[in-house]
Amino acid sequence: MSGLVLKLSPKERVLINGAVIENGDRRSRLSVVTPNANILRLKDAIHPEEVNTPVRRVCYIAQLVLSGDAKQEDGQLQLLRGIEQLSQVLTDPDSRKFLDAASGAVLDNQYYQALKQLRALLPREERLLSARFA
Protein backbone atom coordinates (compact mmCIF):
# COMPACT_ATOMS: atom_id res chain seq x y z
CA MET A 1 0.00 0.00 0.00
CA SER A 2 2.86 2.29 -0.81
CA GLY A 3 2.08 5.96 -1.10
CA LEU A 4 -1.22 5.91 0.80
CA VAL A 5 -2.02 9.21 2.49
CA LEU A 6 -4.49 9.20 5.38
CA LYS A 7 -6.12 12.49 6.30
CA LEU A 8 -7.46 12.10 9.82
CA SER A 9 -10.00 14.23 11.63
CA PRO A 10 -9.53 15.04 15.31
CA LYS A 11 -9.98 11.90 17.45
CA GLU A 12 -10.50 9.73 14.37
CA ARG A 13 -9.45 6.11 14.80
CA VAL A 14 -7.78 3.88 12.28
CA LEU A 15 -6.70 0.26 12.43
CA ILE A 16 -3.18 -0.27 11.09
CA ASN A 17 -1.86 -3.84 11.00
CA GLY A 18 -4.09 -4.81 13.91
CA ALA A 19 -3.30 -1.80 16.12
CA VAL A 20 -5.93 0.88 16.77
CA ILE A 21 -4.43 4.36 16.38
CA GLU A 22 -6.32 7.45 17.54
CA ASN A 23 -5.53 10.88 16.16
CA GLY A 24 -5.00 13.81 18.52
CA ASP A 25 -7.03 16.99 18.82
CA ARG A 26 -6.05 18.40 15.41
CA ARG A 27 -6.47 17.25 11.84
CA SER A 28 -3.43 15.39 10.66
CA ARG A 29 -2.03 13.63 7.67
CA LEU A 30 -0.13 10.35 7.69
CA SER A 31 1.82 8.91 4.79
CA VAL A 32 1.94 5.13 4.83
CA VAL A 33 5.09 4.00 3.05
CA THR A 34 5.10 0.33 4.03
CA PRO A 35 3.80 -1.79 1.16
CA ASN A 36 0.86 -4.08 1.91
CA ALA A 37 0.04 -2.44 5.26
CA ASN A 38 -3.47 -3.39 6.39
CA ILE A 39 -5.41 -0.21 7.11
CA LEU A 40 -9.06 0.35 7.99
CA ARG A 41 -10.72 3.60 9.02
CA LEU A 42 -12.92 2.63 11.93
CA LYS A 43 -15.56 5.20 10.93
CA ASP A 44 -15.94 3.23 7.68
CA ALA A 45 -16.08 -0.17 9.37
CA ILE A 46 -19.14 -2.29 8.70
CA HIS A 47 -20.45 -4.07 11.78
CA PRO A 48 -21.57 -7.71 11.43
CA GLU A 49 -25.25 -6.84 11.92
CA GLU A 50 -25.01 -4.38 9.01
CA VAL A 51 -23.96 -7.07 6.52
CA ASN A 52 -27.42 -7.33 4.98
CA THR A 53 -26.86 -6.73 1.24
CA PRO A 54 -24.64 -8.33 -1.41
CA VAL A 55 -22.24 -5.37 -1.73
CA ARG A 56 -21.96 -5.01 2.06
CA ARG A 57 -21.15 -8.71 2.30
CA VAL A 58 -18.26 -8.39 -0.14
CA CYS A 59 -17.05 -5.18 1.57
CA TYR A 60 -17.14 -7.01 4.89
CA ILE A 61 -14.89 -9.77 3.55
CA ALA A 62 -12.31 -7.14 2.50
CA GLN A 63 -12.64 -5.57 5.92
CA LEU A 64 -11.96 -8.90 7.64
CA VAL A 65 -8.74 -9.27 5.66
CA LEU A 66 -7.69 -5.72 6.55
CA SER A 67 -8.40 -6.23 10.24
CA GLY A 68 -6.50 -9.52 10.30
CA ASP A 69 -9.64 -11.51 11.18
CA ALA A 70 -9.42 -13.49 7.93
CA LYS A 71 -6.41 -15.00 6.21
CA GLN A 72 -5.36 -13.18 3.08
CA GLU A 73 -5.51 -16.34 0.95
CA ASP A 74 -9.04 -17.22 2.08
CA GLY A 75 -10.20 -13.64 1.76
CA GLN A 76 -8.79 -13.27 -1.73
CA LEU A 77 -10.74 -16.25 -3.05
CA GLN A 78 -13.97 -15.15 -1.32
CA LEU A 79 -13.56 -11.59 -2.56
CA LEU A 80 -12.98 -12.64 -6.15
CA ARG A 81 -16.05 -14.89 -6.03
CA GLY A 82 -18.13 -12.11 -4.48
CA ILE A 83 -16.97 -9.56 -7.06
CA GLU A 84 -17.80 -12.02 -9.83
CA GLN A 85 -21.29 -12.50 -8.40
CA LEU A 86 -21.80 -8.74 -8.17
CA SER A 87 -20.64 -8.33 -11.77
CA GLN A 88 -23.47 -10.64 -12.88
CA VAL A 89 -25.99 -8.13 -11.48
CA LEU A 90 -24.29 -4.73 -11.68
CA THR A 91 -23.67 -4.59 -15.41
CA ASP A 92 -23.71 -0.84 -16.07
CA PRO A 93 -20.40 0.76 -17.15
CA ASP A 94 -19.85 2.70 -13.90
CA SER A 95 -20.35 -0.37 -11.71
CA ARG A 96 -18.13 -2.44 -13.98
CA LYS A 97 -15.37 0.16 -13.58
CA PHE A 98 -15.50 -0.14 -9.79
CA LEU A 99 -15.74 -3.93 -9.88
CA ASP A 100 -12.83 -4.25 -12.31
CA ALA A 101 -10.72 -1.93 -10.14
CA ALA A 102 -11.66 -3.90 -7.01
CA SER A 103 -10.80 -7.19 -8.68
CA GLY A 104 -7.43 -5.86 -9.81
CA ALA A 105 -6.70 -4.54 -6.33
CA VAL A 106 -7.51 -7.94 -4.79
CA LEU A 107 -5.21 -9.69 -7.24
CA ASP A 108 -2.48 -7.20 -6.26
CA ASN A 109 -3.15 -7.83 -2.54
CA GLN A 110 -4.27 -4.21 -2.15
CA TYR A 111 -7.27 -4.83 0.09
CA TYR A 112 -7.71 -1.22 1.20
CA GLN A 113 -8.02 -0.13 -2.43
CA ALA A 114 -10.41 -3.03 -3.12
CA LEU A 115 -12.58 -1.97 -0.19
CA LYS A 116 -12.53 1.64 -1.38
CA GLN A 117 -13.74 0.59 -4.86
CA LEU A 118 -16.42 -1.69 -3.45
CA ARG A 119 -17.69 0.96 -1.02
CA ALA A 120 -18.29 3.22 -4.02
CA LEU A 121 -21.01 0.76 -5.07
CA LEU A 122 -22.98 1.07 -1.80
CA PRO A 123 -25.07 4.13 -2.84
CA ARG A 124 -25.89 2.49 -6.18
CA GLU A 125 -26.95 -0.71 -4.43
CA GLU A 126 -29.09 1.27 -2.00
CA ARG A 127 -30.87 3.02 -4.89
CA LEU A 128 -31.47 -0.27 -6.69
CA LEU A 129 -32.82 -1.98 -3.59
CA SER A 130 -35.07 0.94 -2.62
CA ALA A 131 -36.50 1.06 -6.17
CA ARG A 132 -37.09 -2.68 -6.08
CA PHE A 133 -38.98 -2.58 -2.78
CA ALA A 134 -40.86 0.68 -3.44
Image (cartoon, grey):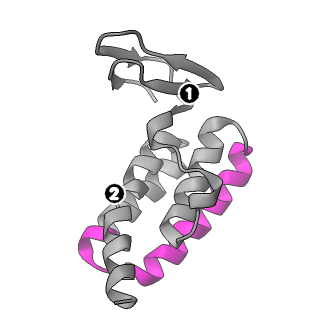
Residue found 34% across the figure and 57% down from its top: 120
| Image location (x, y in percent) of residue 124 | 31, 70
Type of amino acid under label 1? Leu
| Image location (x, y in percent) of residue 88 | 46, 82
CA distance separating discs 2 and 1: 20 Å
| Image location (x, y in percent) of residue 85 | 54, 77
Q: Is residue 126 shown above or below 98? A: below
Residue found 54% across the figure and 50% down from its top: 46
| Image location (x, y in percent) of residue 62 | 57, 50
Helix, strand or loop status at disc 2: loop
Magenta segment: does it hold 85?
yes
Question: Which residue is at the front of the view, 3 or 17?
Answer: 17
Please identify the quarter of the rendering in which residue 129 is found: bottom left
Dot 2 or dot 1: first in sequence order is 1
Which stretch appears magenta? Answer: 70-95
Please identify the quarter of the rendering in which residue 18 is found: top right
Q: Which mark is residue 133?
A: none
Q: Which mark is residue 120?
A: 2
Q: Residues within 10 Å of mark 2 (few under 14, many from 20)?
A: some
Helix, strand or loop status at disc 1: strand
Q: Which mark is residue 15?
A: 1
Type of amino acid under label 2? Ala
Residue found 42% across the figure and 43% down from its top: 113
Q: Is residue 122 shown above or below 54? A: above
